[in-house]
Amino acid sequence: MEYFRLRGTGVSPGIAVGEVLLSEGIVFTSRKIGIKKEHIDRELKRLDVAIHRTGEQLRKLKEEIGKKVGSDHSFIFEAHLFILQDDSLISRIKEIIKDEKTRAERAISKVFEEYSKMFKSIEDEYFKQREYDLKDVLSKIYLNLESYKKLKKDDGKEKILVAHDLLPSEAASRLSQGNVLAVALDVGGTTSHTAILARSLNIPAVMGLSQITRKVKDGDTLIVDGTNGEVIINPPLAIRREFDSKQKKYDSYVRELKKTAKLESRTLDRVRFFPFANIELPEEVDLAFSMGAEGVGLFRTEFIFFQRKDLPSEEDHYQVYSQVAKNAGKKPVYIRTVDIGGEKNFPQLSIEKEPNPALGLRGFRLSLRERTHFKTQLRAILRASALNKNVRIMLPMITGLEEIEEAKLIIGDIKEELKAQKFKYDENIPFGIMIEVPAAAAISDSLVKEVDYISIGTNDLIQYYLAVDRSNELVSYLFKPLHPSVLRLLKFIIDSAKKEKKEVTLCGEMAADPLSALALLGLGLKRFSMNPIFIPKIKKALRSVEYKSAQMIVEKALDLKTAREVEEHFLESILSKHPKALLATEAS
Ligand code: PEP
Ligand code: MG
């Protein structure tokens, strides 16, 4: 048995060791299977029966998956039912059967080829996603034609699922069975539906392995390390032992963290802090809360735009926001209006090419230019605020007071409009801004007076303040959240909010690093928003220190000259006073 190691993207953490179950996707036929003219009607009837059966299966799956893993994951079947009712699609299949006098199998395959060709010529996330859904539905009809080759059934034993890709419905039904130990795919990435599902079900997963399906066969032994994005095929005993012990360590680490998720968010001296989640999809809410999030501190809404061919309608926005607001119950949800422009380009808005996109028409600046779309988004956010009164409006890339005033006028107008149209909304919906441009940071003492809360976006704030492109590997060594200049700036922002008795949250990656989180606590920050999987770790770190000593340690750090001095000072002081706080970084 050959031994291989493959690297991919770890999209769901954890380690699993087990036997391979290779999933064969359906292969459409390229063989023309001719029929006689008088059999055309019989063939059309066969197709109708298969379509009808597919509809019944989709409805059943929708109900089953809804019960097993929640309605967030069953909406996919609703989308598939829509595709099934698409007249142009079904008529095209029928047309091919009639014109080419061929069996339905070939007609379906040909329709798929035609659509695939069209999808390939378009570089658009929305279309890529639709191709996937279309294939899923066509495969189902194909299989329901009866003359298909039966797909391999799994025997119910625990296995590691290996596939080129998983169709959305296949992912939902297979992963919810409870016998999938891990997933390894040739393609895919962090935001794919399968990745999200794997994370919410705690199934380790690695994607983007490009050739794994060619390298394994049923029954091979596989190690999947979803934390480090590695897959090992037929490991020798020594490696297997190494991973067995890593797995045990990881599992007990997770058990511990899960316990932490349920514990109170208080420091050793009983000072309350609040962990929140940064999310991009409504499906992530449940995972966030299971990790101990006390709300959604940042809901990035760009995904709604990237998922579509056209611009999202008010209803498209509303569907998403109302789902998040409902899932969050009484917990707060900070919805950030769209932050596109810059590198996050978006074909639907025909944004000009800019010489320096990071300093260009980005975030709120673009929203002001594309006012109609901005208003559409705000209307949906306001309407969703009526449901649980837990929604907050948050604006990205604010530089000055004029922008806040302008935004308030727009929101005021929309409220009037909604009232006139008898739509409900939360009259007191909190309104806040992100502090992520140094200019806004420098006058945060006056800006904070004009809003209900502020949220510090250190990913951008540090990028602009230290002049370090956040996505440029060549200068990433200069991206230093613990640079004394950054600490001083953060202190000013946090103090400004406190003086006005306004909420201040930090939602950049910095909040997910234990050492930085301890520094932030020392600066007086109590609200930390981050990718949900880091919440237990940060909670553990913050629960292991005294607020008072964090304050003292930071005070000295503010007088140091370099980031390295700050780091060393922190490590030494924390290690001597609260060594447990640093244990939180282990096994991560
Ligand atoms: C930030 O800039 O810190 C932030 C949270 O926003 P984003 O990463 O989406 O730019
Ligand atoms: Mg930002």
Image (cartoon, rainbow, N blue to C red):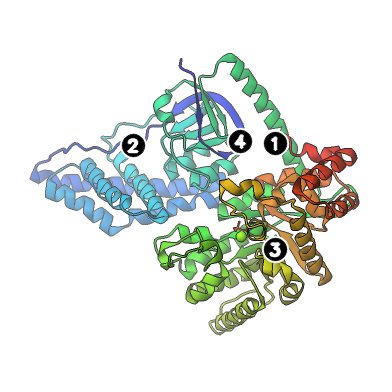
On the image, numbered disc 3 is attached to which residue? 455
In the rendered structure, which disc, 1 or 3, sits on the residue that comes first in sequence?
1
Taking the image in four quarters, ligand 2 sits in the one at bottom right
Q: Marks 4 and 1, how far apart in space?
A: 12 Å
Q: Disc 1 designates what residue?
A: 254
State the separation of the CA atoms marked 2 and 4.
30 Å
Label pair 2/4, CB-CB below 8 angstroms: no
**Among the two numbered marks 4 and 3 on one chain, the one whose residue lies closer to the N terminus:** 4
Locate residue 213, reporting x and y percent. Answer: 41, 29
Give me the C-alpha separation between circle 4 and circle 3: 29 Å
Position of 306 compared to 108: left or right? Answer: right
Residue 153 in sight:
no
Residue drawn at point x = 18 percent, y = 53 percent: 95
- Amino acid at pointer 2: Ile
Q: Which mark is residue 449?
A: none
- Is 385 or 60 nearer to us in this picture? 385
Q: Determine the secondary structure under disc 1.
A: helix
- Under 8 Å from ligand 1: the CB of mark 4? no
Q: Is mark 3 within 8 Å of ligand 1?
A: yes
In space, the residues marked 2 and 3 are separated at their CA atoms by 48 Å
**Residue that label 2 marks:** 26
How far apart are labels 1 and 3 at the CA level? 29 Å
Closer to the camera in the image, 415 or 91: 415
Say which quadrant the C terminus sits in: top right
The numbered dot on residue 227 is: 4
Q: Do residues under tags 2 and 3 come within 8 Å of each other at their CB atoms?
A: no
